[in-house]
Amino acid sequence: MSGDDLEQMYQEVILEAARDPHGREHFAPDLASEDAGSATNTTVRASHEYCTPGESHQFNPTCGDEATVHAEVSDAQPHRIERLVWDGHGCSISQASLSVMVDLCAGKTVDEAMELFRDFHQLMESRGAGLSDPDKEERLEDAVVFQGVSKYPMRIKCALLGWEGMRDSVAKALAAKNAQ
């Protein structure tokens, strides 16, 4: 895909995510508000029977982006992400990346989602060069448009915010499962 095609697709993904962010629900306290100090820690319960929930709050102090990612992981083997939602606010890059991450990872096994996590991390470390493996690019689907973000170190954290939250919330769900 040429640089111009990638840039146009990137703009379309960003605009789509701004209009209709996938997986966004309102369940976390707004930590940016003046009432944040009095906010109680809320936890979303599993809405799927035979699932264990995990939740992770991520904050990017560089630009103020924040997201709380909630994952519900099936109790059955292989563990599958049955529900993946987020709440938060931030720049268009973080919001679009969260939306694309939900599209890619919801319904996947934990192993598949972690493979996507590693592929996306590798894309962000490419400094704009992209991935040399076409299979990885194909797996990432719309997420490949964030290749251009990897040229700007200060923006990489924005794109990775939700992915880090997904990994952490899934890890917390698995840890809770093992503690039962």
Image: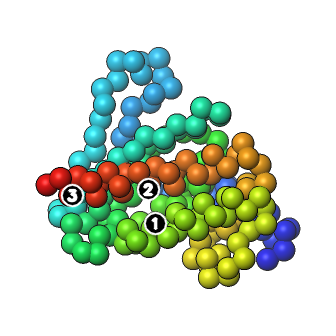
Residue with the mark numbered 2: 167
> Would you say 9 lies left or right of 157 here?
right
Looking at the rendering, in which quadrant would you find the N terminus? bottom right
Q: Are marks 1 and 2 in contact (CB under 8 Å)?
A: yes
Residue with the mark numbered 1: 114
Q: What SS does tag 2 mark? A: helix
Residue with the mark numbered 3: 177
Please tell me which residue is depicted at 56% across the width and 61% down the height of the picture: 100
On residue 104, which mark appears?
A: none
Q: What SS does tag 3 mark? A: helix
Which x, y percent locates residue 108?
40, 72
Which x, y percent locates residue 130?
74, 68
Q: Nearer the viewer, residue 44 or 174?
A: 174
Please tell me which residue is depicted at 72% across the width and 76% down the height of the picture: 132
Q: Is residue 169 above or below residue 104?
A: above
Q: Earlier in the sequence, mark 3 or mark 2?
A: 2
Extreme residue in the bottom direction: 135
Q: Earlier in the sequence, mark 3 or mark 1?
A: 1
Q: How is the image coloured?
A: rainbow
Given the image, on which type of amino acid does mark 3 rest? Lys
Which x, y percent locates residue 126?
73, 62
Please tell me which residue is depicted at 45% across the width and 28% down the height of the picture: 31
Given the image, on which type of amino acid does mark 1 rest? Met
